[in-house]
Amino acid sequence: MYAAASRRHGGRRGTGCRRSVRVYAIYKVGGAQAVAAMAYGTASIPRVDKIVGPGNIFVAAAKRLVFGQVGIDMIAGPTELLIIADEEARADWAAADLLSQAEHDPLSSAVVLTPSQRLAEEVVAEVACQAAQLPRRQIADASLGAVWRSRRCEGTG
């Protein structure tokens, strides 16, 4: 079984993934309630053998509760991501990596460390541009808002 958040919540179809692992059913569910439905089964969603994939703090809590009753990949907490980038790094890629983690949970922390003032400014601009396109922008903004700072490291050139 393959469960993904609806497009409204940033989910994608994932047909390539389905084919490679021989998925026979797809349910458009997500969040802690999806973990419970897949772990125990419902009238419309059968019980599964294993639950894998990322989520926010509520998904992590739900996975902790069902651990031992169903297989899980891991109990992950809020993401903490540090990108170390030199002046050759691509700002658009760094911004995409930041946002891919920040959109999971307001408690996530995503940081770029670079000696390049130019790159830091470009990443800040890219984050703003790419975040405007995200269906889960409010979550990413909340995550980055608490820690997002552009600072030049003194003594690095």
Image: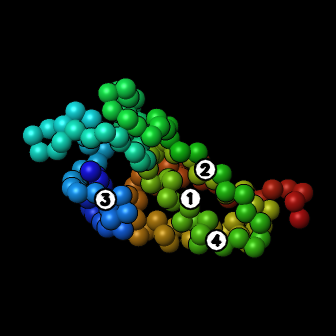
Q: Nearer the viewer, mark 4 or mark 3?
A: 3
Q: Secondary structure at mark 4?
A: helix
Q: Secondary structure at mark 3?
A: loop
Circle nearer the N terminus (3, 1): 3
Residue type highlighted by circle 4: Ala
Residue type highlighted by circle 3: Arg
For the point 19% across and 37% down, which residue is it?
41
The residue under label 1 is 98
Q: Nearer the viewer, mark 2 or mark 3?
A: 3
For the point 40% across and 55% down, which residue is it?
138
Give the quadrant of residue 36.
top left
Instruction: Classify 10 Å Cα crowding around label 1: few (below 14), some (14-19), many (20 and above).
Output: many
Q: Position of residue 108 (x, y in %)?
A: 52, 45
Give the quadrant of residue 137.
bottom left
The residue under label 4 is 91
Circle nearer the N terminus (2, 4): 2
The residue under label 2 is 81
Residue type highlighted by circle 2: Leu
Circle nearer the N terminus (4, 1): 4
In front: 133, or 121? 133
Residue 152 versus residue 72 in the image, above or below: below
Circle nearer the N terminus (1, 2): 2
Q: Is residue 124 left or right of residue 72?
A: right
The residue under label 3 is 22
Q: Name the disc covering residue 120, or none.
A: none
Q: Secondary structure at mark 2?
A: strand
Q: Is residue 151 left or right of residue 74?
A: right
Q: Position of residue 54 (x, y in %)?
A: 43, 47
Distance from Cα at disc 4 to Cα at disc 3: 37 Å
Distance from Cα at disc 4 to Cα at disc 1: 10 Å
